[in-house]
Image (spheres, grey):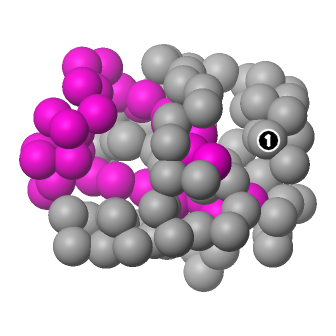
Amino acid sequence: MASEKIQNLDNDSFDATVTEASTPVLVDFWAPWCGPCKAIAPILEELAGELDGKVSICKVDVDSNSELAGKFNIRAIPTILIFKGGEVVDQVVGMTSKADLSSKLQAQL
């Protein structure tokens, strides 16, 4: 269900995509069975369009990538981590508003 502006990451592509990014990267840790994850997906789609070129938006399916979920201590989903320079600079656990996410991303630009 991801658009062309949202990249799906896995254990193999995560480090290269996130640590080598020249822009902030929002990573949504989610699962297909998670209701709030489905609810936040359209918000991420909108942000991906609005901030195209300024921010990368990616998704990690925690069921398929449990190593990554463990590495970042993901205990509840959706969990959104915002990376800058390869480091986590912000985190949101659970459903949130587009305005909240947008302001967190704008703070990293």
Q: Is residue 70 left or right of residue 14?
A: left
Membership of 69 in magenta stretch: yes
Task: Indicate the position of residue 44 as horizontal and vertical percent values.
Answer: 66, 49
Task: Indicate the position of residue 13 as horizontal and vertical percent values.
Answer: 31, 73
Q: Is residue 100 left or right of residue 88?
A: right
* Residue at left offset 54%, top offset 25%: 91
Q: Is residue 56 left or right of residue 52?
A: left
Q: Is residue 98 visible?
A: no
* Residue at left offset 85%, top offset 34%: 107
* Residue at left offset 65%, top offset 63%: 56
Membership of 93 in magenta stretch: no
Q: Is residue 70 left or right of residue 60?
A: left
Instruction: Identify the image quadrant of residue 104.
Output: top right
* Residue at left offset 68%, top offset 54%: 24
Please identify the residue farthest to the bottom as the structure is shown: 4
Q: Is residue 88 visible?
A: yes
Q: How many marks?
A: 1
Vertical side of 68 occupied by 95: above or below? above
Crowd tier of the residue under label 1, counting other residues whose Cα lies within 10 Å: few below 14, some 14–19, many 20 or above: some
**Looking at the picture, which amino acid does disc 1 mark?**
Gln
Task: Indicate the position of residue 64 as horizontal and vertical percent values.
Answer: 14, 56
Vertical side of 22 occupied by 86: above or below? above
* Residues in magenta, as a range: 55-84
Instruction: Identify the image quadrant of residue 9.
Output: bottom left
Task: Indicate the position of residue 17 as horizontal and vertical percent values.
Answer: 46, 71
Q: Which residue is mark 1?
A: 108
Element type at mark 1: loop
